[in-house]
Every structure is written in C-alpha cells, then in structure tokens.
Amino acid sequence: IFVVRNEEDRRRRILVMLNPKSGSGNAREVFNMHVTPVLNEAEVPYDLYVTKHSNFAIEFMSTRCLDAWCCVVAVGGDGLFHEIVNGLLQREDWAKVLPSIALGIIPCGSGNGLARSIAHGYNEPYFSKPVLGAALTVISGCSSPMDVVRVQLQNRSLYSFLSIGWGFISDVDIESERIRVLGYQRFTIWTLYRLANLRTYNGKISYLLTEPEENAQHTPELKMQTSRSCNTHIDKLSTTNNNPSFHHSTEYLPHEFADVISLETSINQSFRSRCDSWLSGGSRRSYYYSVSESIYHSLADDSDFAAQAAISLENRQQNFGPTSSLPELDEPLPEDEGWLVEEGEFIMMHAVYQSHLGIDCHFAPKAQMNDGTIYLILIRGGISRPQLLSFLYNMSTGTHLPEVNNEYVKVLPVRAFRLEPHDNHGIITIDGERVEFGPLQAEVLPGIARVMVP
Ligand code: ADP
Ligand code: MG
C-alpha cells in the first residue's frame, strides 16, 4: 500500500535566505566561506536569496510558490527567522506548507537565541564553531516540531518563536540601540543605567497555566529525517498495521501519521477517538491534518485511498483555519476557565519559549522547543536592587530563577496569557523587535512548525 517517495521528491532543494545586514554585516562572507563548502561537500543543492530590505523575507515566504524547496535556512539572526515564520503563516495554504518545509538557521546575527537554544537542546557545543555546527545541522536533514506563539495586538496578529517582553529587559534591548557603537557592551552598560534609574510599570497579566498532562504529551520529542522519515515510519506502520496489537503501540508514532492510519484502516474506532482527543484544539488539529496531506502525496498509486484522503482534507481545511481559541482582545476573559491574574506594579514581564534569548542569556532553562509551554516570568515592583542585579547577572548561566516562586519573582508555565498595561507608553518587544505599545494576548500553537536539529 505504501509507496516510497519518488526520486524527485527526495532531491528537493534548500532555500537559503541571507540577510547581508545581520550582526556585524558579514553574513554573506560567512556563508561563502563556511557554509557553501559544507553544502557542496554534502552535494546538497540550494538556491540563495539575499534580502534586499526589511520585510523582504516576509514578502518572499508569504507569496512565492515554495514547492521546489524542502527547507528554508535563515542565514542571519532571530529577526530574519521571525520574518520567515511570519511570512509562512500569512499564507492561505499555511497549514499545508508549514509542516512540509523545515526551518533552519545559520547564526550570523547579533541575536542568535534560536541557534543557541537548538544547540543546547541537543547537547551540541556552540561556542567554538557555531556556523559550522549549524551547517552540519542543515545537511543532517533532521527536524523536530517547534511551538509557535500567536500574538494578538490591537490591530494585527503576528507569530513569535522566541519571546514577548514588557519592561526592564525590553527597555535595555531597545534603548541601548543609541549606544550601538559600543558593541555587545551596550547591554551591560544600559542595564546598569536602568538599574540606577529603575522604573516600574503598572498593568494586569492574566494567564492560563499549562495542564501537566498536556505537557507530558509533548515531551517525547519527535525527531524525524526530512527526507527519509516518511519511508521509515511508513515501513513501521505497514508492519504494525497487520499486527492485532497495533493500536497499543501507537503512542510512539509521530501523531502526524495518525490520520493516515485511521483513514487507511478505518477500523480502529478507539484509536480514532483517541487521536481526536489527543489533538483537540484548532491549531493542532489543522497541523495534524495538513501534515497528513503531505504524506498522502507520498502514498502514490492507491487511487481510492488518495481520493478519499483528498475529500476528507478538503472538508477539514474549511473547518480548521489558524483560528484562535481566545476571546477577542477587547472582550473580557471567561470567568470560570482557569484564568489567573497578577496585577499591580511590575519591573518586567518576559514570556519566553526557547531556552536561550541570546548566546549568553539562558533565560528559561526548562523551556523545550515542543513542550506547548510559554514560560511567563514576572518581576514585581518592590524587589531590592541587589536582588534584581543578581537576577540579571545570573541570566547568563540560567541560575537566576528561584526554585519556588516568591513575592517578587514568579515563573509561570502557561499556554496563553493577556497583558493589559495601565500606562500609555512603554516598550514591548516580540522576538527582540519593538512592536506597538498596548494590550496583547498570546497563545501557544504546539509543534506547528518544524525546525532543523542536529
Ligand atoms: P540581527 O540579529 O543582527 O538583528 P537579523 O538577521 O535578525 O540580524 O536582522 C535584523 C533585521 O534586519 C530583520 O528584522 C530584518 O527586518 C532586517 N533586514 C533584513 N534584510 C535587510 C536588508 N537587506 N537591509 C536592511 N535590513 C534588513
Ligand atoms: Mg517551548
């Protein structure tokens, strides 16, 4: 029943998106000197696009036909990666495209939080040769699901893979731009300046804690080969299919294959319903169906099955868009669905979903790429300066967070939150870039993207 992918499919090319203005402005040289030789040696074909301006990657990824590429690799910083993610999610066919294109990063920016987080998550060394390490990751062809956070601002929505910040750290990131000439030192200098002139911000933060069992569902991280995964897993499925105990062994299977199994066999009702509850929630559901679709393409010549699959997908795609499970931003949050509130004076709020915000900022040591969790970190007004200084100082080693939440520092694993600042000015950043100031809400879309891993 299962037919291997054709040769052409296997040879899909890599799309390289390079920002010549990243970091110190030498991404092009870095790519030519350190990445091209690796790609050539591995005989991996690629197409290089150099960004011409800010938002170039958003426009490219949201409008071009991407069928020729199996993955897109950002040669730049987190800002370029952010554009790629947002471009993809602006597509009408995002649900089909996103699971079928793996996202990679070659760190050349001044912010390389994602590259550092990936290396950390896989126990890979980072500091000696980060670019070479990332290039090897790209040719390895391995990828893993990654959470993306949907952020609703007053007049638009966007997608984030790293962080949402309000207060101290965002102030330092943005305000220190004015002393950019000092290089990396600017952060330290501006941190000390801000500490001396400490500000608090008034606001309300509402949040939905992650359910512990929801966490558990995501933990055995799915790791698959971009090119070989389907075949390997499908081989496994075809053997287990004839096995009466098959439905007991489904836990270990990547859930993107669930639909294929259930459609193909149409026999196992209990398995089917388990998949549905397992994958309940709009975004996850469309992810699951759409990943299945890319597999249908590799299922080749069983035309009955293909037809059935196509109809079922069409029905589903009408029902499952990238919808939000939250009320509109200007509507009140439901009273009895578990929303909790922190209100008053804050030094900062930083919501993060990768372990590192930068190469030496180990901000959320527990964060994993696909844990369906936003780590909401709050510092309350009233914290002493020495305590705050030690928090900021220890961020580099990931030893800044208290084991148990205290009056001033709180770490909350959440799946959604809403921020309502009570002041009318201040700095809010998303993935390190400044956005318009005002209320916002965010929710995690678990495992919706695929990122290349070692
Ligand atoms: P860094 O980490 O140094 O900030 P990024 O690659 O993240 O480097 O890029 C930062 C920003 O540069 C991105 O948000 C993007 O909008 C912008 N950008 C991309 N291409 C160009 C370009 N050709 N010229 C100027 N800005 C660009
Ligand atoms: Mg996470």
Image (tube, rainbow, N blue to C red):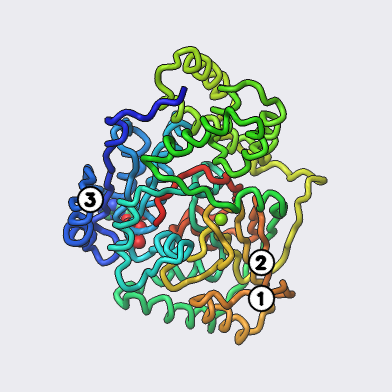
Q: Which one is in front, 2 or 186?
A: 2
The quarter of the image that holds ligand 2 is: bottom right
Left or right: 289, with 420 as reference point: left
Q: Earlier in the sequence, mark 3 or mark 1?
A: 3
Q: Are marks 2 and 1 in contact (CB under 8 Å)?
A: yes
Three-letter code for the amino acid on which mark 1 is drawn: Pro
Question: In the drawing, what numbered circle is on residue 42?
Answer: 3
Q: Image point 43% across, 67% down: which residue?
A: 358
Left or right: 21, with 436 as reference point: left
Left or right: 254, with 39 as reference point: right
Q: Residues within 10 Å of mark 2 (few under 14, many from 20)?
A: some
Q: Image point 57% across, 29% down: which residue?
A: 241
Q: Earlier in the sequence, mark 2 or mark 3?
A: 3
Q: Which one is in front, 372 or 348?
A: 372
Residue 287 seen in render: no
Secondary structure at numbered mark 1: loop
Q: Residue furthest right?
A: 336
Q: Which residue is mark 2?
A: 411
Secondary structure at numbered mark 3: loop
Q: Which residue is mark 1?
A: 402
**Image height check: is 152 above or below 316?**
below
Three-letter code for the amino acid on which mark 3 is drawn: Ala
Give x and y (percent) for residue 256. Answer: 53, 36
Q: Image point 34% across, 66% down: which residue?
A: 110
